[in-house]
Image (spheres, rainbow, N blue to C red):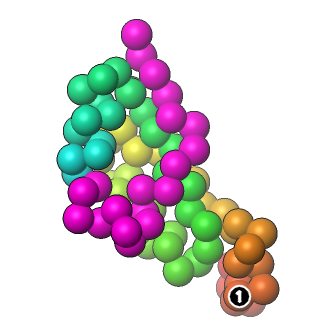
Amino acid sequence: MRLYDAHNHLQDERLAANRAELIATATDVGVAKMVVNGSCEEDWPVVRELAEKFPQVLPSFGYHPWYLQDRTVEW
């Protein structure tokens, strides 16, 4: 069975030390793709890096409502 994780936050710095292991484990149990959801401009570069490094990662760049007040004019 091919599974798809539609929403996660692997870019969270608390997961940094275990990201590769988490992705490998997910792949081993049948997760074919996973959407890593950016929450704000600050974490978008990590989301992009994960997508470039791991073919299973589909990047999603957006704003969580909690962080809208911190957005820049460039967003």
| 15 relative position to 64: left or right | left
Q: Residue 10's spot in the image, x, y percent?
A: 42, 56
Residue position for label 1:
70
Residue 18 visible in the shown view: yes
Residue 59 visible in the shown view: no
Quadrant hosting residue 12:
bottom left
Name the residue type under label 1: Asp
Q: Is residue 65 above or below residue 2?
A: below
Q: From which residue to which does the magenta span run?
A: 1-19
| 1 relative position to 53: left or right | right
Q: In this view, does 3 lie above or below 44?
A: above
Q: Residues within 10 Å of mark 1 (few under 14, many from 20)?
A: few
Quadrant hosting residue 37:
bottom right
Q: Which of 73 and 9 is in front in this view?
A: 9
Q: Residue at x 37, y 69 (%)?
A: 14
Count of numbered tags: 1
Q: Residue 16's spot in the image, x, y percent?
A: 30, 66
Q: Which residue is drawn at 23% across and 64% down?
A: 17
